[in-house]
């Protein structure tokens, strides 16, 4: 079976590709535009091609040549909080890019696609979010992800391919892009400390989130493409336990410095980012039932492993956008003045 993994030089995508190769699949094709991923993450046993999914003609030629039967779609511009300030770019890199892939895939014999969506589709509804909730996204990124989900469902009915939609929790761990100043709070905090800088917390820090270590996520995403009972399902992946951003801050400082935390590295608090959901964590019963999901890595252990990896990589200078499409007084100060 020919398998295609998009976003395969990135964080989650690279681990999904590794898992598939490790369990014996040999025809694993990988694509990434390297805008947020790294060649060092690419498995040498895979067939890698640098490809920007926004380029419709190149994508059509690639898909018609490879003819993937199973696709894991992880390529994304996943900066949820930033999406309000770059709505056109967000849509081009998420929804439009996805259709650029899906349409030729259907024409060339697609049998199944696993769409990695986002918990952001739930919006600000009652927690814990269950898959039975109808999505009510609060941000442009969430709208894009929900559009991808619905388009998949509609086209699957019309053209007869199978699909599974995965909504992961906040995933963290080795291979995260430490140079991204817009997303992945754990990576941002750790990279700031590596650079001998303080980090910033938006709002009160009492926002509740569930965090998933990469080894407790990627294998289940991979299995979602291989298990028949996952067909047609929407599945949350992540632990039922939640933590506040203040909790995360304390654990990272403790694991980074030990018992002697310098006072100068205590976080600074800034206003909430616009459209930020205060409580975002999910149920996981469906993943347990269909994919045999288990949380094996607790938060402190996962953060410790992530810090160990980050120390080996070293501090990464943040990479900022040259311009936002829209800017006003609600644009976070950390982004406008490049404080991270």
Image (cartoon, rainbow, N blue to C red):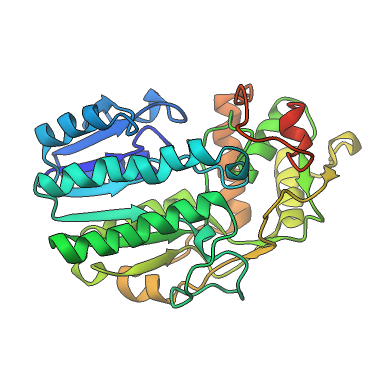
Residue 193 visible to an observer of this rendering? no
Instruction: Please state the horizontal and vertical placement of residue 324, each as a whole percent of the image.
Output: 62, 30
Q: At which x and y percent is residue 330?
A: 76, 43
Q: Quadrant of residue 96?
A: top left
Q: Nearer the viewer, residue 207 or 85?
A: 85
Q: Look at 59% across and 61% down and name the residue there.
A: 210
The residue located at (12%, 43%) in the rendering is 2
Residue 33 is left or right of residue 297, and the answer is left
Instruction: Indicate left or right for 205 with 74 as reference.
Output: right
Q: Does residue 72 lie above or below 320 as drawn?
A: below
Q: Quadrant of residue 231?
A: bottom left
Q: Residue 253 versus residue 167: which sits nearer the camera?
A: 167
The structure residue drawn at horizontal position 14% and vertical position 43%, both measured from the top left corner, is 68
Q: Is residue 215 above or below residue 51?
A: below
State how many labels appear: 0
Q: Is residue 323 visible?
A: yes
Q: Is residue 73 above or below residue 280?
A: above
Image location (x, y in percent) of residue 65: 10, 32
The x, y position of residue 326, in whole percent, is 65, 35
Looking at the image, the residue that sits furthest to the right is 263
The quarter of the image holding the C terminus is top right
- Closest to the observer: 160 or 268? 160
Q: Residue at x 43, y 60 (%)?
A: 167
Q: Image quadrant of residue 320?
A: top right
Q: Horizontally, is 261 left or right of 340 in the view?
A: right
């Amino acid at each position: 079976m020919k398998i295609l993994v998009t976003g395969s030089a990135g964080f989650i995508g690279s681990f999904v590709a590794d898992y598939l190769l490790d369990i014996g699949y040999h025809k694993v094709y990988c694509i990434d535009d390297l805008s947020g991923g790294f060649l060092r993450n690419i498995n040498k046993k895979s067939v890698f091609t640098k490809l920007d999914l926004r380029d419709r003609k190149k994508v059509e030629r690639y898909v018609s040549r490879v003819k993937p039967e199973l696709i894991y779609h992880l390529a994304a511009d996943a900066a949820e909080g930033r999406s309000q300030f770059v709505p056109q770019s967000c849509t081009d890199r998420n929804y439009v890019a996805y259709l650029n892939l899906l349409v030729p895939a259907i024409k060339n014999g697609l049998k199944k696609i696993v769409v990695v969506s986002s918990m952001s589709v739930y919006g600000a509804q009652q927690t814990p979010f269950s898959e039975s909730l109808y999505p009510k996204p609060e941000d442009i990124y969430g709208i894009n992800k929900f559009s991808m989900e619905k388009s998949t469902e509609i086209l699957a009915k019309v053209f007869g391919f199978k699909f599974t939609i995965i909504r992961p929790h906040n995933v963290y761990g080795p291979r995260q892009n430490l140079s991204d100043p817009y997303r992945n709070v754990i990576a941002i905090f750790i990279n700031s400390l590596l650079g001998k800088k303080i980090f910033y917390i938006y709002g009160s820090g009492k926002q509740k989130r569930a965090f998933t270590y990469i080894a407790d996520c990627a294998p289940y995403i991979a299995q979602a493409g291989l298990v028949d009972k996952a067909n047609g399902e929407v599945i949350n992946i992540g632990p039922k336990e939640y933590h506040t951003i203040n909790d995360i801050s304390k654990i990272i400082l403790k694991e980074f410095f030990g018992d002697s935390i310098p006072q100068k590295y205590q976080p600074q608090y800034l206003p909430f980012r616009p459209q930020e959901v205060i409580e975002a964590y999910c149920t996981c019963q469906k993943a347990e039932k269909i994919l045999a999901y288990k949380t094996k890595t607790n938060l402190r252990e996962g953060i410790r492993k992530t810090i160990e990896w980050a120390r080996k990589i070293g501090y990464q200078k943040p990479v900022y956008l040259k311009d936002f499409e829209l800017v006003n007084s609600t644009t976070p100060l950390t982004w406008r003045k490049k404080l991270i």
